[in-house]
Amino acid sequence: MLTTSNPASSRAPSGSARRRWRRLPFVAAVSFMLPAATLVFAPGARAATLYVDLAAASAPPGTGCGASAAYTQICAAPGPGIGTPCAAGSALAAASPGDTIEVCAGTYNENIEISLSNVTLRGAMAGVPAGPAAVPPGRGVGESIIVALTTSAIHLSVSGLTGVVIDGFTIQSGNNPAIHDNPNFASTSHLWVNNIIQAGAGCAGALGAINLNRFSDTRILNNNITGGCGWRIQNQAGVATSLPSFIEDNYLGGAGSGRIILGASHAPGNVIRGNLFDGAGSGIIAGCPGLVITDNTFQVAGTSIYFHSKATGATITGNQMTGGTNGVRQRLDFGPYTLGPTNEVHYNNITAHTNFGAENQLPPGDQDIDATCNWWGSADGPMPPGSGDKVTAGVQVVPWLVAPAPGGACIGGLPTPTPTPTETATPTETPTPTETPTPTVTATATATPTVTQTPTPTPTSTPVCICIQGANAGTICAADSECPGGSCVCGSGPTCGNDVVDFGETCDPPGSVVGPNGNACQPDCTYCGDGIIQTPRESCDDGNSAQCDPVHPQKPVQGDSCNNQCAGLICKDPSTLKVASGLDIFKAHGILIPMSDGEIDFHGNEVTIGLSAEQGSIFTTSVPAGLIEARSNGGFKYRNPLARESGGVYKLVATRTHGGTYKVTVTSYGEANQPGPVMVTHIRVGDVEWNVRATWKQRGSGWKFVNPIP
């Protein structure tokens, strides 16, 4: 069991900043000073909010929209080329690092040049998602629209920029990129969210609607990107990166070459999740290692996922790949392939492709694709040997799913075991014994003394009072005032273990199987599922069965946030446990469903990350209260680079979604102990725990989360 503690930092949090086991256990106490957060969107000492409106008539910085605004232009960079400073009198010309520029609804015909770090541009639709639906609800009316005059609509014009937020705009960029990081520059740690990006049809847009030189620690979330004959998101060349980025919940559609292209120089671990890939061209072309591609829908005309160069060690799970020419390809078209960890492709639906469901151009055995446990469109598997989508040599497919994911059993192609007949023994006949007659004995009668029997005392029990209903249900009380939302009811005390369910008990004896989920009666004669929260063992108990929705795995069934282990529900969790040459790496990704109050405070509570099995704890580490940074959008962030060497939580990001849930990603380092095929992922915030019990599968250098167990 790993136990590492990240001690308090000597630096105060910056406040309002934005979004698989082996060896013996050890205990590590790590002492260090935390570095400053990478994403620093928090305002500095003179942070201000500047208001832009075409009808502005107030003194800077303004107080609102309409005449209360102070600026009529965001930037209005004059001249034909990029790199021209913003016009005097515009909001960006007046802004300082840390400022927020609120752009009111209207159409702004101008080019935006950004030369400041940690600046936030908020359109009228800030916070309203534009993806992943093709037609985003609640959008299209009352937009802040930027119409590019020349070149890129929004250009990051200074090397080394960090923390630029662009939220809630409609960007019409013509035949040029909508957001462009100059190819000679290296910027990082941005958030581009909730934007509708409409590129033109001209091939000058081949650069990409979002065109980047360095894709490092940047989040591209909930955008709707269409049009153009180029890429929706492009970073094919550029400087090497050190931190992974996230592309999540976007709609990527329209004409053009494809949707996402990433070069070979990127850091491992980039996450592409929850996106809808639609229209012409390919879905993803990538040459970088360690990609996490999960829960996306691909309905493109070309190839869904195309790997080349250094694209090894990818995790591809939970995707829908339907139609088009190919599902997953591993090719040599970009030159030699750098061999590395296997690309893992599991629990996807890969169907109806005209060429291949999975193709590997490399010689078999060099860099095979592990594509076991996928649905290929037929219960008899892919072709060969079945009638589903075609696969080539160098693609491992046995076993396969015999029905679509999620829910399909991974047993296709496995031999059917032949039961060994049980031999029935011939009973041996027992001879009938010969009865010996009993002799007659004559006895002299003796008087029998009278025995006085001592009566057995009747068991007594001490009266006990417990809270019925309310926040303290099931706890001992003395008065109604100790039972908010309920009442204090007294009765005879329980005798746990007498096979009788007494007052104050919900089951008896301990160890018996009870409840709708077959839970065990606990030593205190209560059980998970009895509707009474037994703290600290239980974080919730609503007396029913709950699980994540098989159709919408990121949501619980009927909004029930309490799982069958009486903890908060974690949905959509592709966790991994990986052994490395140094410390093991536990990565947990999941959707946390809040309890009844709807909030999870990662900043004000100790946060513990763990993995366990029936034999006990496998991995656990924690971050003390106060070290995880609260962000202005309701999310949280933490990073400790030293954890990669000394152990502990390296990175935690908790993003509040528009559905009220928290999308949590945690990467931790340390040593894990005795994993197994059934394990429980734990995330505890203060006294409240969220967990998911699931089957895991051993893969190469680690274990991988497979399916949750209700």
Image (spheres, rainbow, N blue to C red):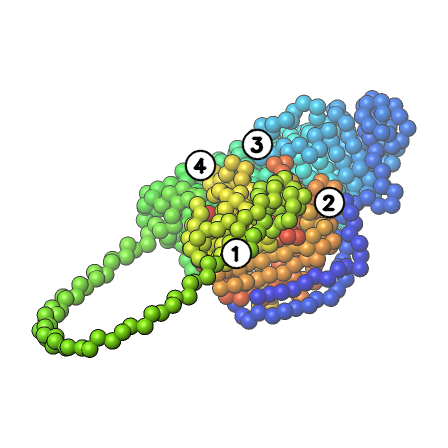
- For residue 631, the mark is 2
Nearest to N terminus: mark 2 or mark 4: 4
| Residue 175 showing in the rendered view | no
Tell me the quadrant of the picture where the N terminus can be found. bottom right
The image quadrant of residue 485 is: top right
The residue mark sitting in front, 1 or 2, is 1
Residue corresponding to mark 3: 133
Q: Check disc 3 and give the amino acid type.
A: Ala
Q: Secondary structure under badge 2? A: loop
| Residue 621 showing in the rendered view | yes
The image quadrant of residue 356 is: top left
Q: Is residue 136 left or right of residue 170?
A: left
The residue mark sitting in front, 1 or 3, is 1
- For residue 323, the mark is 4
Q: Residue at x 47, y 38 (%)?
A: 551
Nearest to N terminus: mark 1 or mark 3: 3
Mark 2 touches mark 4? (CB < 8 Å): no
Nearest to N terminus: mark 3 or mark 4: 3
Residue 427: give x, y in percent of width and height. Answer: 14, 66
Disc 2 to disc 4, C-alpha distance = 40 Å
